[in-house]
């Protein structure tokens, strides 16, 4: 896990930590904006970030299937609450 940093493009001259991750067959990578991780149910302080690892873990048939699973779980979590921020999710991997 890398330490948090200023989002890319906000300020010039920011130095970012980097790391490498080798993905193998069947591995999937999930990249998302804070609109997903900070999603919360109406009247609750529980963030979707607290649930995201459990939702994304386990078997998934494809990147598209994992994306659908994450989006459906976020919608259930948010319930009747409104979307407060942009919500972007990118899933990819090697099959």
Image (spheres, grey):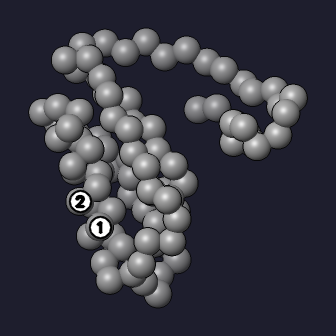
Does residue 41 appear in the picture of this structure?
Answer: no
Name the spot of residue 73 as percent of width and height, x first.
27, 60
- Alpha-carbon span between mark 2 and mark 1: 5 Å
- Residue 7's quadrant in the figure? top right
Whether 77 is drawn above or below 16: the answer is: below
Q: Give the percent coordinates (x, y) of residue 21.
A: 48, 16
Q: Residue at x 51, y 71 (%)?
A: 84
Check residue 75 in the rendering and tell me which mark sits there, or answer none. 1
Residue contact between numbered discs 2 and 1, judged by CB atoms under 8 Å = yes
Determine which residue is flagged by label 2. Answer: 72
Residue 45 seen in this snapshot: yes
Which residue is depicted at the point 26% across and 70% down? 76
Q: In the displayed orientation, state which residue is furthest to the left.
A: 61
Name the quadrant of the N terminus. top right
x, y percent for residue 25: 24, 13
Give the SS element for disc 1: helix
**Nearer-the-camera pick, 31 or 2:** 31
| Residue displayed at 23% across by 59% down | 72
Q: Is residue 5 above or below residue 20?
A: below
Q: Residues within 10 Å of mark 2 (few under 14, many from 20)?
A: few
Label 2: state its secondary structure: helix
Quarter of the picture containing the C terminus is top left
The image shows residue 33 at horizontal and vertical percentages of: 51, 49
Choose top left, top right, bottom left or bottom right for residue 48: bottom left
């Amino acid at each position: 896990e890398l330490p948090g940093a200023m989002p890319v493009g906000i300020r010039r001259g920011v130095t970012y930590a980097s790391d490498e991750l080798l993905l193998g067959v069947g591995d999937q990578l999930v990249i998302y904006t804070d609109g997903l991780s900070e999603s919360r149910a109406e009247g609750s302080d529980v963030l979707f970030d607290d649930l995201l690892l459990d939702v994304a873990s386990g078997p998934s048939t494809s990147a598209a299937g994992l994306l659908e699973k994450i989006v459906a779980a976020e919608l259930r979590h948010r319930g009747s609450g409104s979307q407060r921020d942009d919500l972007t999710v990118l899933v990819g991997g090697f099959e």
